[in-house]
Every structure is written in structure tokens, then in C-alpha cells.
Image: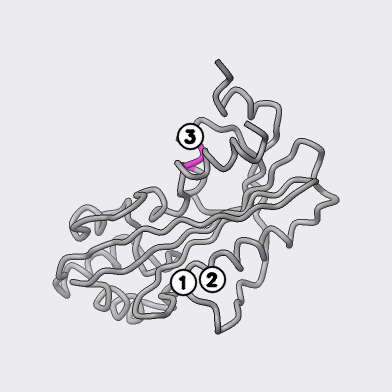
């Protein structure tokens, strides 16, 4: 029997290029050791991109912002981007409270999609994959939306919500696909892709 990823990966240094505490927690939950090196890339994408093409473009953009010459032989750089997609366009992070209210009213009683793309990069190669989840919200009352925004300040989150927060517990009727993908990192697929990337 071969070794599981967690034993094989000890020969590698995983670099997570993300300031997201959710992604930090998810990698920790996978039992992987990693260093955090936030990358500052201007997250602008072409208007013609649709659905998963957007996070794919942005995760590669972040990956390309980390110079390959800074990678050591056994380094694996991990970059990721998550978007909320509804009615043919990206639901961005809210700019203020009124925008957050508008976004959550739009999601209320409806289904939307969450796409996360992850790019793995080493000295020798780069690989990007994407995962889709569908999320259904029940109808939300105005006071529920305002309470959530006031207590959780979801201004750093795509779609104005965190699935792991209060609103996830009381509003989400069902999820088709990976829950952790909606949090910001498709852990099951990441495990499989890392196995392939290091040659399992």
C-alpha cells in the first residue's frame, strides 16, 4: 500500500497565497502544513468571461504574480479565487451596507452558483482546476438580512455572506456540491489534485 497524501506531502513545502482565514482553516482541517505568503494582484478580469472562467483567470493571475524564481525545488504554491454567480454575472463583494442588503435580497428565495478555482504551481509546472456548487436560499426577512450584516460585517465576502456564519445556518435550504467549496476551498478535489500534482 502506498502512503496517503499527508505522508507524501511532507517532502514538499506548501505555500498558500491567501489572506483568507477560511482557507487557512480548511487547509488546517486537511492536516496539511503550509506557509502563508499573501500575494497582491489587481483582481481585474475581462468582461467576456463567464462563470468558472472568472475564478480560473483570477487564480492564475495570483499565481503568476508570484515569481517562479522564488520557488524552491519542492515548493507548491496554492492560489485560489471564489465567485458567486447569478443571472449571468458575478456577484461581487459588497461596497457598503446598502449594497450588502441589495445583494442578499437578490439571493433570498433563489438559487445561485459558487465557483472556486485553484491553481497549483511548482518550478516545473502549473495546473488550474475548478469546482462548482449550487446554493439555495430560503426567503429572508428584511430584519434577518440587516441583523446578519450588522453582526457579521460580510464586506470581505463574495455574495455578501459566509456559509459558515449565522446566515448559513438559518438561510440555506440545500447545497448541491461541496460545502467547503462554498467556504472558499474545495478540499476533496484539492486533495485529489495534489496527489496527481506530486505524482501519486
Tag 1 and tag 3, C-beta contact below 8 Å? no
- Report the magenta residues as a range: 25-30
At 65% from the left and 26% from the top, the residue drawn is 10
Count neighbours of disc 2 (C-alpha within 10 A) and say few if under 14, some if 14 to 19, many if 20 or more.
many
Q: Which residue is mark 3?
A: 30
Residue 94 circle label = none
State the residue in front, 172 or 120.
120
Measure how far apart labels 1 and 2 are at the Cα level. 6 Å
Q: Quadrant location of the C terminus?
A: top right
Is the residue 145 above or below the residue 196 in the image? below
Count neighbours of disc 3 (C-alpha within 10 A) and say few if under 14, some if 14 to 19, many if 20 or more.
few
Mark toward the start of the polypeptide (3 vs 2):
3
Q: Mark 3 or mark 2, which is nearer to you?
A: 2
Tag 1 and tag 2, C-beta contact below 8 Å? yes
At 32% from the left and 51% from the top, the residue drawn is 164
Q: Which residue is mark 2?
A: 54
Please tell me whether mark 1 sits on a helix, a strand or a loop: loop
Residue 180 spot, x, y in % from top left: 39, 48
Q: Mark 1 or mark 3, which is nearer to you?
A: 1
Measure how far apart labels 1 and 3 are at the Cα level. 27 Å
Measure how far apart labels 3 and 2 are at the Cα level. 26 Å
Is the residue 73 above or below the residue 153 in the image? above
Residue 97 spot, x, y in % from top left: 34, 77
Quarter-wise, where is residue 102 in the image? bottom left
Residue 90 spot, x, y in % from top left: 44, 76
Residue 51 circle label = 1
Extreme-right residue of the structure? 69
Please tell me whether mark 2 sits on a helix, a strand or a loop: helix
Inspect the magenta stretch and tell me whether residue 26 lies in it. yes
Amino acid at each position: 500500500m502506498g502512503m496517503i497524501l499527508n505522508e507524501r506531502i511532507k517532502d514538499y513545502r506548501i505555500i498558500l497565497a491567501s489572506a483568507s482565514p477560511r482557507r487557512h482553516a480548511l487547509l488546517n482541517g486537511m492536516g496539511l502544513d503550509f506557509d502563508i505568503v499573501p500575494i497582491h494582484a489587481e483582481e481585474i478580469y475581462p468582461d467576456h468571461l463567464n462563470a468558472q472562467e472568472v475564478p480560473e483567470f483570477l487564480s492564475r493571475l495570483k499565481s503568476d504574480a508570484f515569481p517562479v524564481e522564488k520557488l524552491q525545488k519542492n515548493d507548491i504554491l496554492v492560489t485560489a479565487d471564489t465567485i458567486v454567480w447569478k443571472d449571468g454575472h458575478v456577484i461581487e463583494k459588497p461596497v457598503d451596507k446598502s449594497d450588502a442588503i441589495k445583494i442578499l435580497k437578490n439571493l433570498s428565495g433563489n438559487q445561485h452558483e459558487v465557483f472556486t478555482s485553484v491553481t497549483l504551481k511548482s518550478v516545473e509546472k502549473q495546473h488550474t482546476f475548478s469546482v462548482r456548487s449550487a446554493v439555495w436560499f430560503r426567503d429572508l426577512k428584511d430584519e434577518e438580512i440587516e441583523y446578519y450584516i450588522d453582526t457579521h460585517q460580510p464586506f470581505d465576502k463574495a455574495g455578501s455572506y459566509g456559509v459558515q456564519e449565522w446566515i448559513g445556518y438559518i438561510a440555506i435550504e440545500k447545497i448541491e456540491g461541496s460545502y467547503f467549496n462554498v467556504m472558499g476551498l474545495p478540499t476533496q478535489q484539492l486533495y485529489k489534485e495534489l496527489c496527481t500534482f506530486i505524482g501519486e
